[in-house]
């Protein structure tokens, strides 16, 4: 005799997705690059390095370049020499969030803020049970798809 199959009916939940980019291009790392709040002479010099690569028929993907740019900004533009020697602890993304190096009032974040407000507004008008919601802010592919 086959085992009993038990079905558990779960209450309805909503799922939402917000695709981060800058004017339709890039990903979360591109957003970080855009909202930097401090001078970035070291990171900005990477544009010349990228041009040098292209002159030598070498390429780097935009996503990889943006990651390198943000890493350079965190490690060389914003960190002391002592912090640079402890890069694994002092120059990582988590440590960077403790510093005032991002402009969270930048207009490129307006869409994300409006998206998140939907959940606050939705929660205020519903019961706790109805308000359970899963969402993620995800990167987009170059064609804008998830």
Image (spheres, helix red, strand yellow):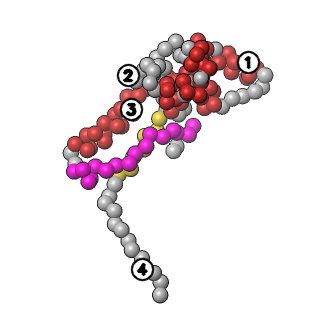
Mark in the foreground, 1 or 2: 2
Residue at 40% over, 45% down: 135
Q: Which mark is residue 105?
A: 2
Circle 4/circle 1 CB separation < 8 Å: no
Residue at 53% over, 16% down: 78
Instruction: Give the Cα separation between the discs numbered 4 and 1.
Output: 67 Å
Q: Residues within 10 Å of mark 2 (few under 14, many from 20)?
A: few
Residue at 59% over, 14% down: 81
Residue 25 visible, this angle: no
Q: Residues within 10 Å of mark 3 (few under 14, many from 20)?
A: some
Residue 100 visible, this angle: yes
Circle 3/circle 1 CB separation < 8 Å: no
Q: Earlier in the sequence, mark 3 or mark 1?
A: 1
Residue assigned mark 4: 4
Looking at this view, name the residue that lies furthest to the bottom: 1
What are the residue bounds of the magenta stretch?
Answer: 127-143
> Of helix, strand and loop, which one carries label 1?
helix
Q: Earlier in the sequence, mark 2 or mark 4?
A: 4
Residue 133 image offset from top left, x and y in percent: 34, 49
Task: Locate residue 103: give its quadrant.
Answer: top left
Q: Is residue 51 above or below residue 110?
A: above
Nearest the eye: 85 or 66? 85
Mark in the foreground, 3 or 2: 2
Residue assigned mark 3: 111
Residue 4 image offset from top left, x and y in percent: 42, 80
């Amino acid at each position: 005799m086959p085992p009993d199959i038990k079905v558990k009916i779960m209450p309805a939940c909503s799922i939402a997705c917000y695709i981060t980019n800058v004017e339709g291009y890039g990903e979360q790392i591109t957003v970080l690059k855009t909202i930097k709040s401090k001078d970035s002479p070291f990171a900005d010099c990477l544009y010349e390095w990228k041009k040098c690569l292209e002159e030598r028929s070498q390429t780097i993907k935009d996503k990889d370049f943006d990651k390198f740019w943000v890493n350079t900004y965190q490690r060389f533009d914003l960190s002391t020499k002592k912090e640079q020697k402890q890069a694994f602890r002092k120059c990582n993304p988590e440590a960077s969030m403790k510093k005032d190096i991002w402009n969270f009032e930048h207009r490129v974040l307006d869409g994300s803020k409006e998206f998140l407000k939907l959940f606050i507004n939705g929660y205020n008008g519903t019961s706790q049970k109805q308000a359970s919601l899963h969402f993620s802010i995800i990167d987009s592919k170059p064609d804008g798809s998830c």
